[in-house]
Image (tube, helix red, strand yellow):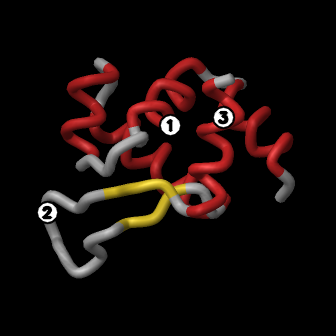
């Protein structure tokens, strides 16, 4: 998927955009939910969508609770574009 398609996907939803921008530094879904003021289930669903698109990855996949998510190389490039 090209960078502009990803930009469009993230930007189309206020909540998706909030969640994405909060991933500038790695965080757990609970931390993101608290900061974005959205439910953890919404954050988890959004993170799963982002992972499918290759812009976010789980940094602690072996953990059952408190998994930490961060941006991939492509996600960092997208973040730069969104911050402009």
In the image, is 65 to the left or to the right of 36?
Answer: left
Q: Which one is in front in this view, the residue at disc 2 or the one at disc 1?
A: 1
Q: Mark 3 points at which residue?
A: 10
Secondary structure of residue under mark 1: helix
Nearer to the camera, 77 or 58: 77
Q: Which residue is drawn at 26% across and 72% down?
A: 60
Q: Give how far apart the Cα atoms at labels 2 and 1 are.
A: 21 Å
Quarter of the image for residue 64 reads bottom left
Q: Residue at x 40, y 56 (%)?
A: 70
Q: Could you tell which of marks 3 and 2 lies nearer the N-terminus?
A: 3
Q: Residues within 10 Å of mark 2 (few under 14, many from 20)?
A: few
Image quadrant where one finds the N terminus: bottom right
In the image, is 80 to the left or to the right of 72?
Answer: right
Q: Position of residue 43 (x, y in %)?
A: 38, 39
Q: Could you tell which of marks 2 and 1 lies nearer the N-terminus?
A: 1
Q: Residue at x 48, y 31 (%)?
A: 21
């Amino acid at each position: 998927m090209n960078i502009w398609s990803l930009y469009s996907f993230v930007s189309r939803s206020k909540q998706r955009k909030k969640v994405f921008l909060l991933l500038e530094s790695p965080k757990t879904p609970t931390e993101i939910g608290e900061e974005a003021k959205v439910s953890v289930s919404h954050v988890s669903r959004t993170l799963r969508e982002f992972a499918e698109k290759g812009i976010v990855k789980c940094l602690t996949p072996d953990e059952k609770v408190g998994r930490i998510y961060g941006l991939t190389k492509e996600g960092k490039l997208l973040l730069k574009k969104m911050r402009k």
